[in-house]
């Protein structure tokens, strides 16, 4: 029988992955490690399984007397306003967390890691295959997230090369769906929350920037297959996402049309906001045959809207996301450099 450590298990994607983990019959212990920074206990409150226990702690500080057969490292904020507000925590959760957690892995155990399409930065090729090395600015406003994911990938591939550790590294493209925080701030959830609140959907820039939006259940099905279910020799990196690319303005218009009385408000563009993002799924189709992001964008948005309606019932107003930190900071930078020149 096996023991598993799932970090970030109270988070948006992590909690959906826990729903899959408890279906396993070959596991007798699942420890969820989460510091409740962006995750919530509510996300896993429905789990009734005596094999599951919860440790509230930071991944970079966690210690355990026993080691695990599998460690799945999902603990990290993924929403730009959240990780931009706390870059040190973001970097330590990813890199510090991975370094610390490697000590808790049994010899011969498997370390799985949720990396990101952000390793491609503002890509100059589309769609992006895993071999594309990306266009990332290590001094830019997204760097705490992008670079810590990249460095954690480096760490794991080096651990495999030098110590033979069994790894699984997946690069997730944009994911949306139920259990996103109401104050998460990412596009789909923010537009839905805004539509249900004051009806003003904030589009940064002209909205022509695009993303490939994957519904969480589909993505988690792919994760479960790659991390444990399928017998796969390949450790990664593996793109996982929906390859239907839709512009931000189209998402905003679509959601605005679903809720009467909405309007779109254009905000200043976000510095270094990637212009496009779309997975090349050639490798994914070979490694996970038959998998695809099968939930249509329209169905996924409808399900997410329903879930948000349920969450917001009884709330007088929507909790606000931390806010686009970059806009006021850029204004501050502009005015202070103008006054000093
Ligand atoms: N975005 C937007 N309005 C919002 C939230 C996001 O226009 O209220 C844009 C954001 O600038 C980016 C895209 O939507 O171009 C996707 O942003 P998100 O935060 O969901 O994820 P990212 O891919 O940027 O990490």
Image (cartoon, grey):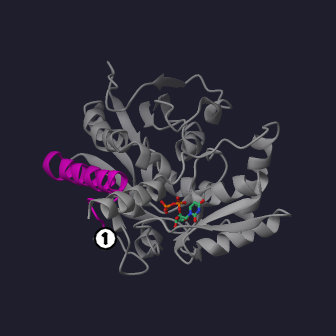
On-image quarter of the C terminus: bottom left
Res 94 quadrant in image:
top left
**Residue at 78% in and 53% down:** 196
Quarter of the rendered structure image containing ligand 1: bottom right
Residue 152 located within the stretch drawn in magenta? yes
Residue 40 located within the stretch drawn in magenta? no
- How many marks can you see? 1
Task: Tell whether 160 sits left or right of 67.
Answer: left
On-image quarter of the N terminus: top left
**Residue at 42% in and 33% down:** 5
Q: Residue furthest right?
A: 260
* Image coordinates for residue 175, horizontal then vertical, percent: 56, 58
Compared to residue 317, the image places residue 47 above or below, namely above
* Image coordinates for residue 150, horizontal then vertical, percent: 29, 56
Residue hosting label 1 = 134
Residue 317 visible somewhere in the drawing: yes
* Element at label 1: loop
The magenta stretch is 135-163
Q: Residue furthest top?
A: 65
Res 107 quadrant in image:
top left
Residue 255 visible somewhere in the drawing: no
């Amino acid at each position: 029988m096996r023991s598993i450590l799932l970090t970030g298990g109270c988070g948006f994607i992590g909690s959906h992955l826990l729903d899959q983990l408890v279906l396993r019959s070959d596991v007798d212990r699942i420890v969820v490690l989460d510091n409740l920074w962006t995750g919530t206990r509510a996300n896993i409150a429905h789990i009734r399984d005596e094999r599951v226990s919860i440790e509230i702690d930071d991944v970079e500080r966690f210690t355990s007397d026993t080691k695990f057969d599998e460690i799945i490292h999902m603990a990290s904020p993924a929403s730009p306003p959240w990780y931009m507000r706390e870059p040190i925590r973001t970097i330590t959760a990813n890199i510090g967390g991975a370094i610390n957690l490697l000590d808790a892995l049994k010899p011969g155990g498997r370390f799985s890691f949720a990396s990101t399409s952000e390793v491609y930065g503002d890509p100059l090729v589309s769609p992006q295959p895993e071999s594309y090395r990306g266009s990332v600015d290590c001094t830019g406003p997204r760097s705490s997230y992008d670079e810590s994911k990249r460095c954690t990938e480096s760490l794991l591939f080096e651990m495999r090369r030098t110590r033979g550790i069994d790894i699984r590294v997946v690069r997730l493209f944009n994911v949306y769906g139920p259990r996103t925080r109401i104050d998460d701030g990412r596009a789909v959830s923010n537009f839905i929350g805004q539509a249900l609140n004051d009806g003003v959907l904030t589009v940064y820039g002209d909205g022509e920037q695009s993303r490939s939006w994957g519904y969480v259940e589909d993505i988690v099905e792919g994760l479960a297959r790659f991390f444990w279910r399928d017998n796969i020799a390949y450790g990664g990196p593996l793109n996982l996402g929906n390859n239907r690319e839709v512009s931000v303005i189209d998402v905003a218009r679509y959601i605005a049309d679903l809720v009467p009385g909405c309007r779109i408000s254009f905000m200043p563009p976000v510095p270094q906001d990637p212009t496009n993002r779309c997975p090349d799924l050639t490798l994914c189709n070979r490694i996970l045959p038959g998998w695809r992001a099968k939930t249509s964008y329209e169905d996924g948005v409808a399900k997410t809207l329903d879930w948000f309606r349920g969450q917001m019932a009884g709330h007088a107003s929507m909790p606000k996301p931390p806010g686009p930190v970059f806009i006021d900071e850029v204004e501050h930078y502009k005015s202070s450099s103008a006054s000093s020149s």
